[in-house]
Image (tube, coloured by chain):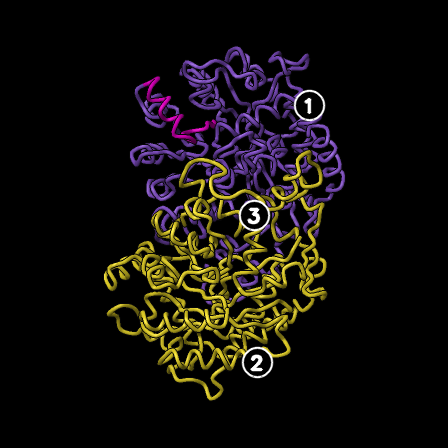
Chain colours: A yellow, B purple
Amino acid sequence: MPGMASAHSHAFQRALRGRTQSRNANKLTAAGNFWSWRDQMFQLVAELTPDDVLAISRFAFVELAMCGVTAVGEFHYVHHDVGGKPYANRLVMSEAVIEAAAEAGIRLSLIRTGYYRAGYGQTLHEGQKRFCDDATEQTLRDVQALTALTVGKTDHFRVAIAAHSIRACQQQQYLDLSAYAKQHHLPFHMHVSEQQREVDECVAEYGKRPVELLADDGVLDARFVAIHATHLLPHESALMGRANAIACICRTTERDLGDGLPVAADLAQAGVRFCVGADSHAASDAFEEVRAIELDERARHERRIVAAQGEALLAAATTHGYAAIGYADMLGQDQVYLRADDPSIADAMIGSRAETVTDAVVFGANARAVDRVIVGGKMIVDGGRHIHYDAALASYLACLKRLS
Amino acid sequence: MPGMASAHSHAFQRALRGRTQSRNANKLTAAGNFWSWRDQMFQLVAELTPDDVLAISRFAFVELAMCGVTAVGEFHYVHHDVGGKPYANRLVMSEAVIEAAAEAGIRLSLIRTGYYRAGYGQTLHEGQKRFCDDATEQTLRDVQALTALTVGKTDHFRVAIAAHSIRACQQQQYLDLSAYAKQHHLPFHMHVSEQQREVDECVAEYGKRPVELLADDGVLDARFVAIHATHLLPHESALMGRANAIACICRTTERDLGDGLPVAADLAQAGVRFCVGADSHAASDAFEEVRAIELDERARHERRIVAAQGEALLAAATTHGYAAIGYADMLGQDQVYLRADDPSIADAMIGSRAETVTDAVVFGANARAVDRVIVGGKMIVDGGRHIHYDAALASYLACLKRLS
């Protein structure tokens, strides 16, 4: 099968897996939520050095490759030192991510993210200092500097742009970034309506819901990727569809964070293309990411086959995922070979219908079924194991040890 | 870690994996539902020979073992020939399941299931003929005959009883079966409120909701296992808790069938013990089954850590699962060894908190992490592969080919 794209990744958050699941770890006496999880994430961020980002990202990308991912969109927003000052080499954090992907051997779209404020009328959290640029000019200067680094390497390393979210950018800021992206034909990503609170804050600031605002602003187009798109009303899905925008659904993370269920059937009905992302790396299972678009939507409707069937889900992992991170031209250059005899997909071998193979893989496959992964002719996973697995694991564990 | 129990299995349904996911396969032009899926299941049932049941069940059990399951509760209701007549050897279908488990090397609780009618005021579907006994006397005679077969093998083969559901049994029928189970200290299982339609039919027939009815009838006790327990009102969860009953949550199947979200937080709050089951074998991933109890509940509440934390989820897979199928005394006899260096759980190796290992495994592990599985001192999975995998796969595929 073609290689899969994980179009929305925060690789450094891989270090939180298994560390945010108890109330003790969250210092909570009752249920937590996205925002209490975010406090733990900020705590991690406060400690990260460029070497940590390299070690964690490399392991995260190696693990993605071992579940059939060949291209990743890294939504990158940890740029500055602990005090919020740019490093002497402004790009040092980005370079850590770039090196991590190069060593893992997967294609990277570094999605340089603009982040400027805590939220409408809110004071900056200590943990957010490392994310913030002073102005979009700074962000775009970094985009240009990063673009210069891609010369001669554009098969494996490209640059895209994100405005983190409506809460983290003022209107003129995301408009500046969007205009640059349109001018240079770059993908433009933005977290959209992940949490109900974000929708409420947007309405309070602008009198419009997030997708209404972005549509009125002319931000939505075929290169716009709405991350999550969870709390959308039907007319917002329709606006997305009319603009031919993409929705990046990140179910393993959304499920972990209690984000709620995205309106997958509405989005599909409106003709919105789906892609998927490992996001927080709460899990690394691209097959689970794509089937969850359909399966989790069944819980809402208490019906089956409501949002997308096998072929459409496979396209989310491949065609639309590659398009979402600016690698549409590389689709078909990367291959994933599954073990036909793995029990999770053994059913694909026998079938009277053409769809059987696709359905057996999309709805059945797990990471154990991944045998070989080839990116641009180079085998990076062989026999289910990444060729640099031991080294990547050792440096990841050393990093975790230091952080914990 | 201790071996895990899959307390609710319909092993023969393994043959449907990947074959019910498209509208074509369902002969549908719009979304399907549980009932349209059931038509496909009936179609499969109409074809099954005892040899098919052996081949499919053996492969299903081998696959379960490869994800760390060491004991299974087979909710067995396909007893008779295609015309609905008992086979000359009444137990031939049961014996196929027993042989399948013995060859797979996992402990089996054969849950002999009484099934007597289509539903309140409904005509029997052709596909249900093979399930139906004429009377509970017949069912209980089979239970006795099966119990006789366990002599000398009770370490690996035990018998329990189920009434299929309120729709498939009249009140006196499930009371008869429950009375026998109580008298012989056997687990007593029953599908409870999987679909809203079942709740509505129960109210129409008895003027009570399912758990209200079963509580008033004195059926609920510490050996009662409510399968699914999806559409419960808070006072029904409380009734379950007061009786110290067990809820068997089967998320991978419930999610597939569009059953809706079980009220996991309510049940936990009421002190109800959880266990899990592969049910239709839409997936075989016991780790996913247990974490989904918590993770899917987050979608409802849009909060985190709402129903159960790591230790409680691990208990669902082990302690409560073994208890639910009558193997409480065997807990600790079976071991699963995970690869500590599998990326899905690598985080367990480093941690400053005691919970880290449990949380990393419960929330992270996938089937690829399973290395060795030992049941009663015998290694049945080695290096992630079942010792009889090739033979089990070959006969499964031959069977699928014949059926498709």
- Cα gap from disc 3 to disc 2, whole angstroms: 51 Å
Mark 2: secondary structure? helix
Q: Residue at x 50, y 75 (%)?
A: A402
Chain that bears disc 2: A
Residue ID for mark 1? B50
Residue A390 seen anywhere in this rendered image of the structure: yes
Tag 1: amino acid? Pro
Tag 2: amino acid? Leu
Residue ID for mark 2? A149
Q: What is the x, y in percent for residue A17?
A: 48, 61
- Cα gap from disc 2 to disc 1, whole angstroms: 65 Å
Whether callout 3 and callout 1 share a subunit is answered yes
Region in magenta: B188-206
For discs 3 and 2, the disc positioned in front in the rendered view: 2
What label does residue B2 carry, if any?
3
Q: Nearer the viewer, residue B172 or A267?
A: A267
- Where on the picture, by quarter, is residue A54? bottom right
Tag 3: amino acid? Pro
Mark 2 packing: few (<14 Cα in 10 Å), some, or many (20+)?
some
Whether callout 3 and callout 2 share a subunit is answered no
Above or below, B135 against B28 in this view is: above
Chain that bears disc 1: B
Q: Residue at x 49, y 44 (%)?
A: A294
